[in-house]
Amino acid sequence: MLEIDQLIDVLRDGGWHSIAEVVEKCGLSLPKVKSIMEFLIEYEFVEVNVDGRKVKIASSLREFLLKTEI
């Protein structure tokens, strides 16, 4: 599984997750998670809460993943 897939899999539930939680569940390093998150945020695949401490999958990406699940 690609690293970005691991990260998206953690966020797939649609809830808010701290970066520390994502790091722990993915088993990736903090710098790697931050790098992937920057990409996902830039292209609006992931949303950041008001204080910038939590992230969640964007509803459009979540809907796409649910519709294309096999």
Image (cartoon, rainbow, N blue to C red):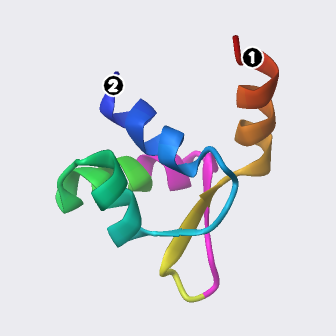
Say which quarter of the image contains residue 30: bottom left
Q: Circle 1 sits in a helix, a strand or a loop, which is it?
A: helix
> Which residue position holds label 2?
2
Left or right: residue 60 compared with residue 34: right
Query: Where is the C terminus found, in terms of image quarters?
Result: top right
Across and down, in percent, residue 39 comes to 43, 47
Numbered tag placed on residue 68 in the rendering:
1
Magenta residues, start to end: 39-50
For image coordinates 78% across by 49% down, the residue present is 59
Question: Element under label 2?
Answer: loop
Query: Residue at left 79%, top 42%?
Result: 60
Q: Is residue 21 in the magenta section?
A: no
Badge 2 density bin: few <14, some 14–19, many ≥20, Cα 10 Å: few
**Residue in front for this viewpoint, 43 or 63:** 63
C-alpha gap between disc 2 and disc 1? 18 Å
Instruction: Note whether 62 is above or below 29 in the view shown.
Output: above
Q: Quadrant of residue 21?
A: bottom left
Taking the spot 35% from the left edge, 53% from the top edge, the residue there is 25
Residue 46 placed where, x, y %? 60, 54
